Amino acid sequence: MSHPWDDRSEDRLNARKPAKRRSRAKEAQDGTLTDRAYRELEEMIVTLQLMPGTVLSEQALSVRLKIGRTPIREALQRLARDGLVVIMPRRGIMVSEINLLLQLRLLEVRRELERLMASLAAERATEDERREFAELAEAMLAASAKADDIAFMRLDQRFNSLIATAARNEFARRSMGLMNALSRRFWYQHYQEVADMPLAAKLHAAVADAVAQKKAKAAAVASDRLIDYIEDFARKTLDA
């Protein structure tokens, strides 16, 4: 027969277990909500639904997205690391401004990184990833034919993510992660003035096709041609 103290101790121990499980479940849910908040806010900023200079309210965003304030706060911290928002102590959070000179400096780095990642992806992508690259190429051409800018932006985001994954280099992936959203927002702001969406889609598709076909050198060349276009696009915004 067990001592009463032992029963109570076991009861207390068992009582703790569900609490731990609930805590882990809550952490997993919060992580998913943070990811969702990040994706939705990132798209709203990149597509200028939240314009540069807009002061953001955690409470207002929580209501708008139907997500708790903690995931919203965590998503905003990630967006600050991406350069899309600026956190001002005791003053609030503001959507960052768009700066042409910043974009040109960013492209200097993007050129080298994207060439490396395209060639690595061509060498290291799995068969499933190669099939997805081929599908992305077709989808981007289709989106440009319909002049569907939102669909094209989402495909471009998926293209960037897939290149980063297939390259199998975490350092390059982290570096590119800091630049992709800023670049997409800049493109979205000016594409109606000076961009050629069919050409942009064709150049993206060339990179994707080269990766899908395991052609590392061709992927690197296609990547440089894509950056040539993006740099020319950035400079044309000055004239526009």
Image: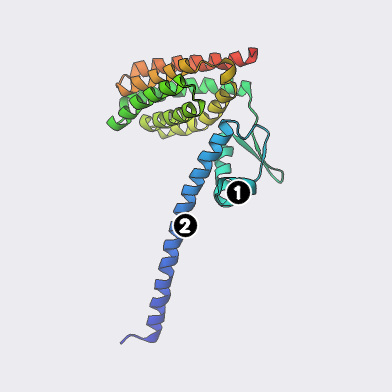
Residue 57 placement, left or right of 157: right
Q: Determine the secondary structure under disc 2.
A: helix
Picture disc at residue 107: none
Res 106 → quadrant: top right
For disc 2, the marked residue is 26
Res 202 → quadrant: top left
- Where residue 101 appears, x then y in whole percent? 62, 21
- Where residue 96 appears, x then y in whole percent? 64, 33
Q: Amino acid at mark 1?
A: Val
Which residue: 50% across, 29% down?
Answer: 150
Q: Amino acid at mark 2?
A: Lys
- Quarter of the image for the N terminus: give it: bottom left
Which residue: 42% across, 72% down?
Answer: 15
- Quarter of the image for the C terminus: give it: top right
For disc 1, the marked residue is 63
Which residue: 55% across, 15% down?
Answer: 233
- Where residue 63 appears, x then y in whole percent? 60, 49
Camera-side residue: 40 or 215?
Answer: 40
Tally of marks: 2
Camera-side residue: 138 or 226?
Answer: 138
Q: Determine the secondary structure under disc 1.
A: helix
Query: Separation of disc 1 and disc 2 at Cα?
Result: 20 Å
Nearer to us: label 1 or label 2: 1
Mark 1 closeness class: few <14, some 14–19, many ≥20 residues within 10 Å: few
Q: Vertical placement of 95 versus 60: above or below?
A: above
Q: How is the image coloured?
A: rainbow
Seen from this angle, which residue lies furthest left? 127
